[in-house]
C-alpha cells in the first residue's frame, strides 16, 4: 500500500468520524424535547464509566475522556440554545433542505432517512416542523407523501415552490469515462429520464443525492457518479453535467407541516 492510498483511507475515515459526530449532536439536540434541564450529571457519569471499559487499546483513558468531555460540553451548548427543529428527508444540501431553509433560516434542519421518519417525529413532537415534497412539475404528484400527510395528526403551515435543477457529479480524481454506476434519488431519476436514457451507466436508487455525495466522499469510489443539487459542488466534487432535468422550468412544491397537537413536557 502506498503513502497516497494510506492518506486517502485516512481522509475517508475523517469524513466518517465527522459524519458520526454530526449525527450524535443531532440526537443530543432531540433529547432536549424530553428533559426539563439540559445538564444530566447521572447520564454523563454513565458515559465516562462506560468509556473506561471499552477495549480500544490505542486510545488512552486520558484521550477518550478528553474527547468526550469536549463532545459533552458542545452538546450542552447546543441544547441551551432555543433551537427550532425542522425535519427533512435526505441530507444537507438537498432540495428538501433548501425548502427548510427557505421556511426558517434560523431553524436547525435535521436530516432523516425516510419521509415516514419525518412525519412520525413531527407527530411525536420530536420535530417542531417537517418538510414534505408533494408535487413535481415533471414527475407529478408524489402520492406516497400525500398519503403520509393524510395519515393524521398533521396540518399544513405553508407551502413552498422550490426550483429543481439536477447535476451529475463525480470525485475530482475521476472522469466521465471512469463511471460505471450513478446513484440518485428515485425522483431525480424520473426527472432526468431523457438524459439518462442516452447513457450506458447502471442507475441505482439511493435515498438522497446529497447523501450519495457523502457516501462516495467516504469511500473514494471513482467509478460512481451522483445526481444531486448544484450545492454539491461546494463539497469539492467535479461537476460533469448541469441542468440535466427534462424540463428547465422544473420545480417541486413542498408542504411545511406541524403536529395538530403540541406535546407538553
Image (cartoon, rainbow, N blue to C red):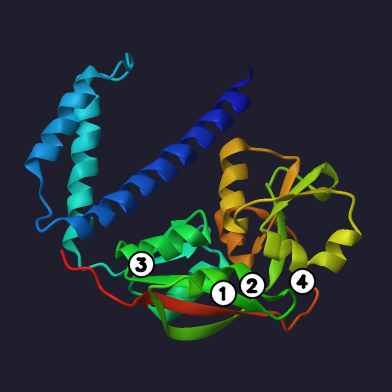
- Answer with mark 4 or mark 3, whichever residue precedes in sequence: 3
Residue 54 position in % (x across, y down): 27, 19
- Answer with mark 1 or mark 3, whichever residue precedes in sequence: 3
Q: Quadrant of the C terminus?
A: bottom left
Identify the residue at horizontal 42%, vertical 38% (top origin): 17
Above-or-below relation of 171 to 6: below
Horizontally, residue 124 falls left or right of residue 171, namely: left
Residue 178 position in % (x across, y down): 82, 42
Give me the disc on residue 123: 3
Q: Is residue 28 visible?
A: yes
Q: Nearer the viewer, residue 190 or 219?
A: 190
Per the model, the C-alpha gap separating discs 4 and 3 is: 34 Å
Dot 2 corresponds to which residue?
142
Per the model, the C-alpha gap separating discs 1 and 3 is: 15 Å
Check if mark 1's residue and mark 2's residue have beta carbons within 8 Å.
yes
In front: mark 2 or mark 4?
Answer: 2
Per the model, the C-alpha gap separating discs 2 and 3 is: 20 Å
Label 3 sits on a secondary structure element that is: helix
Instruction: Specify the quadrant of the image occupied by residue 6.
Output: top right
Horizontally, residue 145 falls left or right of residue 107, namely: right
Label 1 sits on a secondary structure element that is: helix
* Label 4: how many Cα within 10 Å (few below 14, some 14–19, many 20+): many
Per the model, the C-alpha gap separating discs 2 and 4 is: 17 Å
Amino acid at each position: 500500500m502506498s503513502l497516497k492510498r494510506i492518506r486517502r483511507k485516512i481522509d475517508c475515515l475523517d469524513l466518517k468520524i465527522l459524519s458520526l459526530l454530526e449525527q450524535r449532536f443531532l440526537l443530543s439536540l432531540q433529547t432536549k424535547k424530553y428533559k426539563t434541564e439540559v445538564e444530566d450529571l447521572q447520564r454523563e457519569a454513565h458515559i465516562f464509566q462506560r468509556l473506561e471499559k471499552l477495549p480500544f487499546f490505542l486510545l488512552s483513558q486520558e484521550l477518550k475522556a478528553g474527547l468526550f468531555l469536549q463532545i459533552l460540553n458542545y452538546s450542552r451548548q447546543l441544547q441551551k440554545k432555543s433551537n427550532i427543529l425542522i425535519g427533512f428527508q435526505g441530507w444537507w444540501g438537498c432540495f428538501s433542505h433548501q425548502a427548510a431553509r427557505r421556511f426558517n433560516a434560523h431553524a436547525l434542519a435535521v436530516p432523516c432517512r425516510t419521509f415516514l421518519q419525518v412525519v412520525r417525529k413531527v407527530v411525536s413532537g420530536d420535530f417542531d416542523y417537517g418538510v414534505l415534497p408533494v408535487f413535481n412539475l415533471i414527475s407529478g404528484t408524489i402520492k406516497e407523501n400525500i398519503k403520509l400527510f393524510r395519515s393524521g395528526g398533521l396540518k399544513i403551515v405553508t407551502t413552498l415552490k422550490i426550483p429543481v435543477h439536477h447535476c451529475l457529479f463525480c470525485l475530482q480524481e475521476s472522469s466521465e469515462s471512469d463511471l460505471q454506476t450513478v446513484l440518485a434519488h428515485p425522483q431525480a431519476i424520473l426527472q432526468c429520464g431523457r438524459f439518462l436514457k442516452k447513457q450506458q451507466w447502471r442507475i441505482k436508487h439511493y435515498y438522497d443525492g446529497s447523501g450519495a455525495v457523502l457516501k462516495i466522499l467516504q469511500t473514494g469510489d471513482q467509478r460512481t457518479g451522483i445526481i444531486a443539487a448544484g450545492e454539491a459542488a461546494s463539497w469539492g466534487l467535479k461537476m460533469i453535467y448541469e441542468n440535466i432535468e427534462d424540463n428547465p422550468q422544473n420545480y417541486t412544491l413542498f408542504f411545511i407541516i406541524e403536529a395538530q397537537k403540541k406535546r407538553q413536557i
